[in-house]
Image (tube, helix red, strand yellow):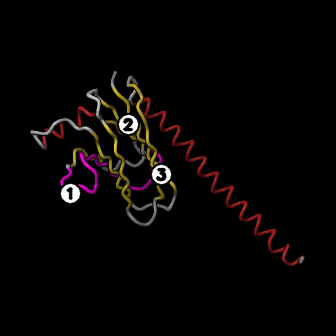
Amino acid sequence: MIKLFKFTLPLAVCLLWIGLVSGGNDNVLEAQMSTLKQECKEMIKGTRYEGSKITYFTAGSSKQVKNIEVYTFLLDEYKFAISAKKCTAALTVKIYDAPADNKDRVLIKEFKKVQGKNLKFSTTELNDAYVAKIPDADRLRNIHIEYSIGSGKGTKEGIVLVYGIEP
């Protein structure tokens, strides 16, 4: 019985420590994402805040693709801010008019090497680029943002998207 206790006590302590350390890292990342969300809100200052989306991922040994859809059904101008400051893996942001499963979707705008940076754009820019590619097209009713994430160190990271409407 004593030998079993000598084995299980260190094992239990080790498992508890692993749980605390990994949980702590998630809390730190969430706090960092919250700070970046506030930075993004500042980037689109003067808009009426509409929403945000934090995309978490683990930058592993292979490339990943994450997709987000944002509805832009109002005629007002939408402004978008993306923060990839806590992203160390190579990151490309592509904006499309349709989801990934639509073979006829159109690439409207692309931002390369965004890791470690912030960026912003508006529906005016996107609509101008869209109409330049498809002259008889109407304005965008929604946009599909695709994050192409390169391989990384195996760490958990995140990307913040914030958007608002010009009053």
* Earlier-in-chain disc, 3 versus 1: 3
Which label was assigned to residue 56?
3
Using residue 131 as the reference point, say whether residue 94 is left or right of it.
right
Element class at badge 2: strand
Q: Residues within 10 Å of mark 1 (few under 14, many from 20)?
A: few
Residue 121 spot, x, y in % from top left? 30, 36
Count the labels in the image: 3
- Identified by mark 2, the residue type is Ala
Q: How crowded is mark 2: few (under 14 residues within 10 Å), some or many (20 or more)?
A: many
Using residue 18 as the reference point, say whether residue 28 is left or right of it.
left
Which label was assigned to residue 103?
1
The residue carrying mark 2 is 81
Using residue 57 as the reference point, say whether residue 112 is left or right of it.
left
Residue 59 spot, x, y in % from top left? 46, 59
Q: Distance between the residues labelled 3 and 1?
A: 27 Å
Q: Does the magenta stretch include residue 101?
A: yes
Residue 66's image quarter?
bottom left
On screen, residue 16 above or below 35: below
Q: Is residue 139 magenta?
A: no
